[in-house]
Amino acid sequence: MKIVKIEDLHCDAGWRDFSFLKITTDDGLIGWSEYNEGYGSAGLTAVIRRMAQGLIGQDPRPIERIMTTQYAITRQAPGGLNQQAMAAIENALLDVKAKALGVPVYALFGGPVRDRLPLYWSHCGSYRFRNAAMMGVEPVRSLDDLVKLGKHVKERGFKALKTNIFRFDFDPPNMHQPGFGRTPGGPELNADGKTLAAIADGLAAFRQGAGPDMGILLDTNFNFKTEGYIKVARTCEPYNLFWLEIDSYDPEGLRLIRDRALMPIASCESLFGRRQFRPFFENRSIDVSIIDVPWNGLAESHKISTMAEAYEINCAPHNFYGHMSTLMSANLCAAMPNFRIMEIDIDDVPMVYELRCYTLSPGKMPEYLKAAETIGRPARGQNYGVNHGYWTAEFGALNQIWHLWKYDSYEERTRLRGELMKNEKWTKGYVPVIRPLIQRQDLRLMNPVVDILPDDGTKGNVYELRIYRTVLGGAQQYGENFKKVRAARDKYSKIWGAWTGEFPQPNEWIHLWRYKNLEERFKARGDAMKDPDWQAYLAKGPPLLAEMHSTLLMPTNYSPLK
């Protein structure tokens, strides 16, 4: 078996990008891993590409030999981007080897020790300050919002949540992040009275909403120095923390904090390799060791956890990336005996959209709209999936209602629809009223290519829904072609969302456009047709297309998009 190709792939994940490494062998096996160029790692892809050049033609299975060779090559510049590049390669090689042997990756390390993993909801509330609209969730703007969020986490069945320091005295409210240079307070990083009060208020709000049994973890990142962390620990004492998480490169300073803190101390997520972890273990600086699998590699992470076991220290993965990273970290958690708990981000850009179309019996539209506005929408709200639009069809097929929903995942869609069936206002108050009015139901499950834009407060718009049926396997290529020309097309009118079909028709390219009126639509399309970049894009279309459909949509009174 030989490595024949190593590729890096990247996707828009909302407020950051997700990056993936793909290793292909001569017998068709493919190994995958996820890495991340954010948070100080710009240029990582270039390092991976340079490092990958020497691996073409090698057998991917002797991973230890490959990685010790890479370590030797980079010995004079250890850690940092070199180690992250090695980790991306190592994780993809492990995927290849496991597939070649027909076993899960955890089996390469003697696992599983366990087949179920306790999770905590990470960055609880943190992403909702700036990215709520993108995620389709309510923003965090007050302590009352934290109370509501804590209650929601409990209702979702989580036993633990991790949050950050929130400053509602900032304009606008935001996270406290001077250690990363994002908010005032650096470089001195002192723990002043307002910051300590904000910590106490935030923890009290989460405790009120989530209840006394919820494990609460506070991540303070690099935002203080040793003196400040001791003050923070004292501030947290009334709230019975699961752990206080601290980033520090000083093992002796961290030991001092641990000696004076009444709660467990977790750290080490920013460290590389056993050699950097060792002094933290020897100094008894921590209660829980946090290991970053995309930074260290799964094999090296398992070695770190084995070393921690000798010091009676349990480990938890640092996992705030994408779903592939979650799977990589889960394999570590399944294999290491000294496992504490696993991190997972729940708030994220939606991965699944559902487009529904109801064809009504002639003359029943007014009755349906009244029932939907007065019974259906109040009963469902945004609690069972996030609704982005409700429209009636104006041209083409008439007597149609279209509505667009988004969910975190297919599993979440299934769960939420099950919960909806328990809502009697829906099942007994709404469904019996509208069911006689509907002749036919159609739905599409879709994957986002251009995520839906949020409502911008304007009203009186019309929307055009275009559905292109492509030849077998053509939808993805059509979408890739569009992404390359999107900037040129946006000069004339912005696309409001675009998707590839998943079910029941996988070979579809679905896109939604918004205009102030039909005149604006005609002008935008006419101007775009004169653009050479757009003309070149259209020229690539005919070989990929089988059918094209267009429907003009008018928002209902209760549509989020107006």
Image: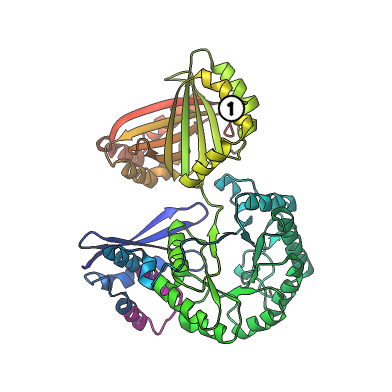
Task: Note whether 55 is above or below 198 in the view shown.
Answer: below
Percent of width and height locating residue 299: 40, 74
**x and y percentages locating residue 558 in the rendered image:** 61, 29
State whether the magenta stretch is mostly helix, strand or loop: helix
Tell me where residue 163 sits by quadrant: bottom right
Which residue appears at 39% of the width and 67% of the height? Answer: 106
Residue at 33% x, 78% y is 64
Q: Amino acid at mark 1?
A: Gly
- Left or right of 94 on screen, residue 336: right
In depth, the one of 265 and 194 nearer the eye is 265
Give the SS element for disc 1.
loop
Image quadrant for the N terminus? bottom left
Q: Give the answer, above or below, for where 480 lies relative to 253.
A: above
In this rendered view, identify the residue nearer to me: 300 or 461. Answer: 300
Where is residue 429? Give x, y as percent: 62, 26
Q: Is residue 106 magenta?
A: no
Quick one: 460 or 27, which is closer to the camera?
27
Residue 392 visible at all: yes
Q: Is residue 140 above or below residue 333?
A: above
Residue appearing at x 38%, y 39% in the figure = 501
Residue 558 in view: no
Tell me if residue 75 is in the magenta stretch.
yes
Residue 252: which quarter of the image? bottom right
Instruction: From the image, tell me which residue sits under label 1.
Output: 460
Q: On the picture, is 230 further left or further right than 23?
A: right
- The C terminus sits in image quarter: top right
Q: Quadrant of residue 84?
A: bottom left
Above or below for 379 versus 88 = above
- Which span of residues is magenta-colored? 67-91
Q: Where residue 538 sits: x, y (%)?
A: 31, 37
How packed mark 1 is, by other alpha carbons closer than 10 Å (few <14, some 14-19, many 20 or more), is few
Kindly identify the residue that appears in the image at 64 percent across and 30 percent down: 425
